[in-house]
């Protein structure tokens, strides 16, 4: 929290005005909002938004984005169960793994850069479940028209309502962007340091105690969990630079270079190996939740990962045909443990090391109402990988857009599927799986009447984790499905308005074609918000208040394993068909937005049948307060 305090003090210093500054005789014109630009890693530009809409309410959460299609765990800072499969992102490169730990992990594609007319600060605060807070402080400024600097820090601490459920998260991001006066040279760099610590209780030992509604368990700390002292920790450090130089002033040829180095450390710690579970007779039974272990206490599993990416591109721009890019890339990674293992099941190495080289090209064209993008990448040295994608956009008018796209990826397996070492004997493996083949198609329409999106996937050689010993123990192993899985989703969104009232609706239909239950999603997921909006106090205060209902149909929801930091397929219990009702009052005064929400209101009088995973209940009723404060200087 010291880093956060330093940033807050720096933000206050930037925004403060000296008391003895003389008043200027003529006030300078105020900068318009289009001079406060946000540039994504893909170089798309948006502007700072201080408005209050229903989308502001959807985005005011731990992830700072609309979390429709995600099911949060009971404490802030924990994983999310993915209800909408099309939210998954795929790349041809292997991911380091531990994906359940990465929902609040900023990748290079998540980092924004800025250009602002005057210093701009944003402060975010939201209360948490118990004993803590969630704070996010951000400040950016242009020291000149050519150079922008920004720094942001997100800090979270929340104890949670259940035993051993503490979350502690820190995300520090520092960016700089620069261009010469003639813009022949441009550069962007960022540094990110992130740490995510979670106490891992392993879920409830007896779900029936929670479902019974017995008032003695209204204090959730009385419910027994599998682990009272286990925890997982993810640390990440990254430096990223991309810059470009136009070769000749009058020749539309630009050379681009991107270099990125990232290091990750993951540790799972469990001092007490055996779990004590109450049996039907009231006695206790000792259970080895994850099977036999090589140690009797103080179990620690540690893995490390680093990668270095180099990409050199030549970009040729034409005024009529479009922009052509040709590139060569080099991707090197090391994924390693502190030892080699020789077990009865075979030899488990302590290192995966690989160097991959690829060639590719991109095409971009924008003319009139049409925009076209396409890209192709293929590995030419090292293990094979490939990616082909294309999209087209047609802008009917300022409020209506049609989009379509297709992609095909031959993906190298994520590293936790290929290699894993643990002091738990069943969690050691070394595999040589085939590449996953992922083909997708999407069609989307955004109009003033309806937003619609159709997505289809064909998945071959899908990799997944599964519980190989169903029951009270979790013996999770990786598997590869050699058949084809078909997935189709249709997502519709429409808001109806009548005077000061509005009803916002989002409905998602999903269908999966497969011979075995490998990819499991709810058939129907929907959200409906009825709310009222109006100005008060001579339009100084704008208020939105209403009720939001979230719900999804029952299905074989994935479970979570803390040893791996991954979700896995379970085939024993269906979860769903319970409503989640929130009541909110949001207000806006100038650039300040205030959010008050009574979460899961219906849990006060409904059944205890709400879960985020088979042995992990969803959140109980609570009232939370938050504020988002913008300063323009």
Image (cartoon, grey):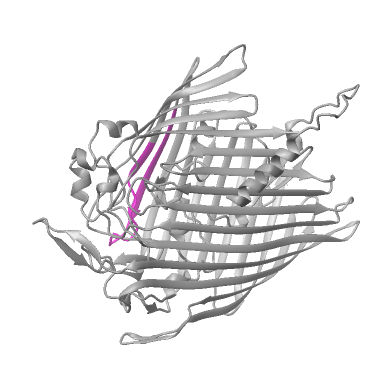
Nearest the viewer among 221 and 86 is 221
Residue 349 lies in quadrant: bottom left
Instruction: Say whether residue 624 is left or right of residue 611.
Output: right
Within the image, what quadrant is residue 346 found in?
A: bottom left
Left or right of 22? Residue 452 is left
On the image, the x and y values in percent for residue 237 come to 60, 63
Query: On the rendered structure, is 171 left or right of 428?
Result: right
Residue most extreme to the top: 538
Residue extending farthest to the front is 20
- Residue 87 or 97: which is nearer the viewer? 97
State the extent of the magenta-drawn residues as a range: 504-526
| Of the pair 316 and 540, the residue shown nearer to us | 540
**What's the residue at 73%, 61% (across, down)?**
242
Is residue 142 shown above or below 513? above
Residue 466's x, y, as percent?
31, 65
Residue 523 forms part of the magenta stretch: yes
């Amino acid at each position: 929290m010291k880093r956060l305090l330093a940033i807050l003090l720096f933000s206050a210093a930037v925004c403060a005005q000296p008391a003895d500054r003389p008043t200027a005789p003529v006030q300078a014109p105020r900068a318009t909002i289009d001079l406060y630009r946000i540039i994504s890693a893909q170089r798309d530009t948006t502007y700072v938004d201080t408005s209050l809409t229903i989308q502001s309410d959807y985005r005011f959460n731990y992830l700072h984005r609309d979390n429709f299609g995600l099911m949060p765990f009971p404490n802030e800072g924990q994983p999310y169960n993915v209800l909408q499969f099309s939210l998954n992102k795929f790349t041809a490169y292997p991911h380091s793994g531990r994906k359940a730990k990465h929902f609040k992990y900023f990748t290079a594609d998540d980092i924004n850069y800025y250009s602002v007319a005057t210093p701009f600060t944003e402060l975010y605060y939201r209360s948490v479940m118990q004993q803590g807070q969630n704070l996010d402080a951000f400040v950016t400024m242009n020291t000149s028209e050519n150079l922008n600097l920004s720094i942001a820090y997100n800090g979270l601490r929340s104890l949670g309502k259940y035993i051993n459920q503490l979350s502690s998260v820190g995300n520090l991001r520092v960016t700089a962007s620069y261009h010469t006066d003639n813009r022949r040279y441009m550069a962007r760099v960022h540094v990110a340091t992130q740490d995510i610590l979670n106490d891992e209780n392993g879920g409830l030992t007896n779900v029936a105690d929670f479902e019974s509604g017995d008032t003695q368990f209204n204090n959730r700390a009385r419910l027994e969990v599998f682990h009272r002292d286990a925890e997982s920790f993810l640390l990440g450090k990254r430096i990223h630079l991309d810059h470009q130089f136009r070769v000749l002033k009058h020749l539309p040829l630009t050379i681009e270079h991107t270099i990125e180095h990232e290091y990750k450390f993951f540790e799972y710690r469990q001092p007490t190996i055996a779990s004590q579970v109450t049996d039907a007779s009231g006695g206790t039974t000792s259970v080895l939740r994850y099977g036999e272990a090589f140690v009797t206490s103080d179990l620690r599993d540690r893995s490390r990962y680093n990668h270095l990416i180099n990409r050199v591109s030549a970009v040729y721009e034409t005024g009529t045909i479009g922009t052509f890019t040709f590139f060569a890339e080099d991707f090197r990674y090391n994924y390693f443990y502190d030892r080699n293992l020789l077990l009865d099941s075979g030899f488990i190495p302590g290192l995966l090391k690989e160097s991959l080289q690829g060639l590719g090209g991109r095409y971009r064209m924008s003319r009139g109402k049409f925009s076209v993008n396409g890209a192709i990448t293929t590995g030419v040295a090292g293990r094979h990988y490939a990616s082909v994608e294309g999209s087209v956009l047609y802008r009917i008018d300022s409020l209506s857009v049609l989009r379509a796209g297709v992609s095909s990826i031959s993906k190298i397996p994520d590293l936790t599927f290929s290699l894993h070492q643990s002091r738990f004997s069943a969690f050691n493996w070394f595999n040589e799986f085939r590449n996953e083949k992922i083909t997708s198609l999407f069609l989307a329409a955004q109009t003033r009447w309806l937003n619609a999106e159709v997505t289809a996937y064909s998945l071959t050689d899908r990799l997944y984790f599964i519980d190989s010993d169903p029951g009270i123990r979790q013996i999770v192993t990786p598997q590869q499905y050699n058949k084809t899985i078909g997935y189709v989703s249709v997502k519709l969104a429409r808001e109806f308005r009548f005077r000061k009232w509005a009803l916002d609706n989002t409905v998602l239909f999903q269908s999966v074609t497969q011979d075995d239950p490998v990819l499991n999603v709810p058939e129907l997921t929907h959200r409906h918000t009825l709310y009222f909006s109006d100005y008060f106090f001579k339009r100084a205060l704008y208020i939105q208040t209403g009720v939001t209902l979230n719900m999804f149909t029952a299905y074989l929801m994935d479970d979570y394993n803390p040893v791996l930091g991954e979700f896995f397929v379970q085939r024993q219990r269906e979860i769903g068909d319970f409503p989640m009702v929130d009541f909110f009052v949001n207000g806006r005064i100038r650039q300040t937005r205030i959010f008050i929400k009574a979460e899961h209101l219906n849990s006060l009088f409904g059944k205890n049948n709400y879960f985020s995973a088979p042995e992990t209940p969803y959140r109980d009723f609570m009232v939370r307060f938050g504020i988002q404060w913008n300063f323009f200087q």
